[in-house]
Amino acid sequence: MRGTCSNIGSETVGDLVQAWFVADDAGKAEIIDNLVGDDRRFGFLAFLQETYASPIEQMRLTKILGRASSFAQRESVPTATVASYFYKISGGGIEATVLSLFEAFSADRGSYVIVEEEEQLPPELGEMQDKLVVLRSSEGEDVAHCKLLADAALACGVDVLIHHAWFDPGLLWDVLACKLQGIAVVLYEYG
C-alpha cells in the first residue's frame, strides 16, 4: 500500500498507527522515513516498542526497517561530531577503549562520551570530563531511555553515535530513536 504517508505532516500519531496496520512492508518503511525529525517520532516509537515487544516481533520490525531509506548506510562525513555511548566506564579495560576512540575522533572533530551511570570519569580519563554527558533515566523505561540518548546526542550536535552496549535488550529502540533524529549509529562490538 504505497503512498500511505503522502500527507504525513497532517496526521496524528493515532492516524499513523492506523496506517501502520494496513500498510505493507514498503508502506511501513515509508512511514518510518517520513518520521525522521518529525515531532511525533517518539509517540510512534512508543507504539512500536509496545507492538514489537518480543524478540521475534523485533526481528520482524528489523526486516521492515531494512527497507527504510533512512536506515541505509550513509556516506562517511569527514568532519562528523562523534559520541560514544556506554552504560558505565570502569573495569575490564573499557578505559583504554574510550581513550583510543576519543583521541581518534577529537583531533579535528567534536567528540563526546555519553554514559548512563557515571558522574565522573575514571582518573585516567579526567581530561575528557568536559565532554562527558550523563543520561538520567528510570529503570525499565526503554522509550524514555532511548529518547534521552537521542536527545543528548542531538543536543551535542552529534552526527554519528558509536553504541557500545551491543548486548542491551533496548538496543533496537536506541538505534531507532537516533535514526529518527537523523543520527547515524555504529555498533562497536568487543569482548
Image (spheres, rainbow, N blue to C red):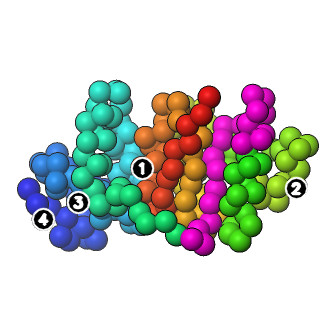
- Residue 51 placement, left or right of 179: left
Mark 1 surroundings within 10 Å by alpha-carbon count, few (fewer than 14), some (14 through 19), many (20 or more): many
Residue at (42% x, 49% y) in the render: 176
Query: Which badge, 1 or 3, is on the more N-terminal residue?
Result: 3
Q: Is residue 147 magenta?
A: no
Query: Which badge, 2 or 4, is on the more N-terminal residue?
Result: 4
Tell me the amino acid under the disc marked 3: Glu
- Residue 140 placement, left or right of 117: left
Residue wearing tag 3: 30
Tell me the amino acid under the disc marked 1: Leu
Q: Locate residue 178, reporting x and y percent.
A: 48, 55
Residue at (89% x, 44% y) in the render: 124
Q: Does 181 appear above or below 115? A: below
Region rendered in magenta: 78-97
Residue wearing tag 4: 3
Kindly indicate whether the residue at mark 4 contacts the one at mark 3 (C-beta within 8 angstroms).
yes
